[in-house]
Amino acid sequence: MRTRKYAPLLPALLLTLSGCGFVGGGGPAPLTPMPSQVPTGPEYGTVDDVITAMAKGGFDCKVTVRNENKFGSDATCEVQHRGTTVVNEISVLSTARYSRDEVGDSIASRRSGPYAQTIVAAGNWFIWVRPGVYAYDMAAALPGSVVLEPLVEK
């Protein structure tokens, strides 16, 4: 008689536990590691450091959007190159807050899926270069960086 009394509560208990991650495959998806070809440095403190490095490499990047917080900074800047406006969306992640694999996971989300972005990366930073054909020129201006082509599902 007792089991029938509590039987209606069992589905509610299972739903509650599954919502809390105690039942089923819950939890966050594993991080996508940083691609092995991405060098560990140079690391930059802010987007201004990346923009300064770009200028040393011959690209005067005019900032159009900027955002800074305790977790890092990002900016969008434009350069004139070969008669084209090249848009660079720069992200610098705080090494105190983010691991290398967390940076890699952020990069992976941009290279795959519907985004399929071409990325220049090294250390704790990356740049989405548009049009992507100019990513190799931007990487050449930033010693130690590599170009990561979009990941296209087949």
Image: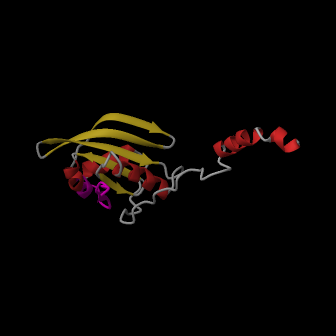
Name of the residue lying farthest toward the top: 64
Query: Where is 46 relative to 124, above or below?
Result: above
Q: Name the residue at the front extreme.
A: 1
Snapshot colouring: secondary structure
Question: Is residue 90 inside the magenta stretch?
Answer: no
Residue found 38% across the figure and 58% down from its top: 42
Foreground of the two, 104 or 127 = 104
Q: Which quadrant of the view contains residue 80?
A: top left
Quadrant of the image containing the N terminus: top right
Q: Is residue 14 left or right of residue 106?
A: right
Q: Is residue 106 left or right of residue 55?
A: right
Q: Is residue 140 left or right of residue 126?
A: left
Q: Which residues are magenta?
A: 138-154
Left or right, 71 with respect to 9, comes to left
Task: Give above or below for 38 relative to 7.
Answer: below
Q: Position of residue 127 (x, y in %)?
A: 32, 48
Disc count in the image? 0
Q: Position of residue 73 (x, y in %)?
A: 42, 42
Percent x, y for residue 121?
A: 34, 55
The residue positioned 41% from the left and 47% from the top of the image is 92
Q: Residue furthest left?
A: 83
Furthest residue toward bottom: 36
State the quadrant of the C terminus. Answer: bottom left
| Picture quadrant of residue 130 | top left
Closer to the camera in the image, 154 or 147:
154
Q: Residue at point 59% right, 53% down?
A: 25
Depth check, front residue: 40 or 53: 40
Question: What residue is rendered at 84% in x and 44% in y?
Answer: 3
Give the image location of residue 141, x and y in percent: 24, 55
Front in this rendered view, residue 109 or 66? 109
